[in-house]
Image (spheres, rainbow, N blue to C red):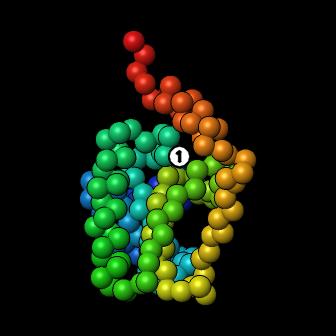
Amino acid sequence: MKDCIFCKIIAGDIPSVKIYEDEHVYAFMDIMPLSKGHTLLVPKTHREFVYDLSPAEAANLFSAAPKIASAINETFQPEGMNLLNNNGAKAGQSVFHFHLHFIPRYGETDGFGAKWMTKEKEFTAERIQELAEQVKMKLTPAT
């Protein structure tokens, strides 16, 4: 896509600090990092959301993920690492080319935080089962 910043990075039209590339994916350091080693992994084919990835594209991307995570881990030895993907503006996506963040974690003041607010009172075991059945219906091939 001609107006996509990540497509321009992949094409070499915009400079990046590349750490990995193969025929399917491109990984580079985030220029607005949340922590030391913050890296982005993108498919070379423009896809906006995870829903748009073909099974082969997803397999190529996620097969590269452990290599990148391991290299970041060995290099910087963080206390942990978040892998994050935002799908859609309401989920915080700001660049509409699928990308997976690798965010090394160094402690509570490292620039990234997520607060979980569970809703176990709203989502009882029975309600969770109902929701699961709705999702499973979409996963079952039509006969």
Q: In what quadrant of the picture does the C terminus appear? A: top left
Callout 1 secondary element: loop
- Residue located 40% across and 21% down the image: 141
Q: Where is residue 107 in the image (x, y as percent from the top left)?
A: 54, 86
Q: In this view, does 124 lie above or below 134?
A: below
Of 115 and 103, the residue lying toward us: 115
Q: Position of residue 113 (x, y in %)?
A: 62, 75
- Residue located 35% across and 53% down the image: 61
* Viewer can see residue 16: no
Total labels drawn = 1
Q: Position of residue 104 (x, y in %)?
A: 46, 78
Q: Which residue lies furthest to the top in this view?
A: 143
Of 98 and 10, the residue lying toward us: 98
How many neighbours does mark 1 have within 10 angstroms: few (below 14), some (14-19), or many (20 or more)? Answer: some
Horizontal side, residue 72 vs residue 137: left or right: left
* Viewer can see residue 111: yes
Q: In which quarter of the image is residue 19?
A: bottom left
Q: Which amino acid does label 1 sit on?
A: Phe
Q: Is residue 138 above or below residue 72?
A: above
Q: Quadrant of residue 53?
A: top left
Of 59 and 123, the residue lying toward us: 123
- Kindly identify which residue carries mark 1: 49
- Residue located 49% across and 52% down the image: 98
Horizontal side, residue 28 vs residue 91: left or right: left
Q: Position of residue 3 (x, y in %)?
A: 57, 52
